[in-house]
Amino acid sequence: MLSWLGLVLNIGAGIYCIVTGDLVTGLIALFVGTPYLYAQAVVFSYVSKRL
């Protein structure tokens, strides 16, 4: 659950950075951080179902 929360917060932070004018940080958050956190959330969801 925390991985999914981190994913949502990362997307929100990336959009917030873009809106406030910090374009590079927002794009890094969206295009680097989001896929990493999504993969982590999917793996942890799969592992928790097996346990």
Image (tube, helix red, strand yellow):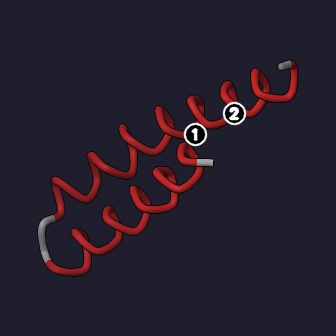
State the CA–CA distance, disc 1 to disc 2: 6 Å
Instruction: Give the residue displayed 56% in from the left and 30% down from the top.
Output: 40
**Count of numbered labels shown in the rendering:** 2
- Under mark 2, the amino acid is Val
Task: Report x, y in % for residue 36.
Answer: 47, 32
Q: Mark 1 — residue?
A: 38
As drawn, the label of residue 42 is 2
- Under mark 1, the amino acid is Tyr
Task: Report x, y in % for residue 50.
Answer: 87, 19
| Residue 26 vs residue 1, the one in the foreground | 1
As drawn, the label of residue 48 is none
Q: Residues within 10 Å of mark 1 (few under 14, many from 20)?
A: some
Instruction: Give the residue displayed 59% in from the left and 30% down from the top.
Output: 39
43 sits to left or right of 16: right
Q: Secondary structure at mark 1?
A: helix
Query: Given the current orientation, which residue lies at the most extreme bottom position?
Result: 20
Query: Given the current orientation, which residue lies at the most extreme left position?
Result: 22
Q: Secondary structure at mark 2?
A: helix
Pointer 1 with pointer 2, Cβ within 8 A: yes
Task: Report x, y in % for residue 2.
Answer: 54, 47
| Residue 17 vs residue 24, the one in the foreground | 17
Instruction: Give the residue displayed 75% in from the left and 21% down from the top.
Output: 47
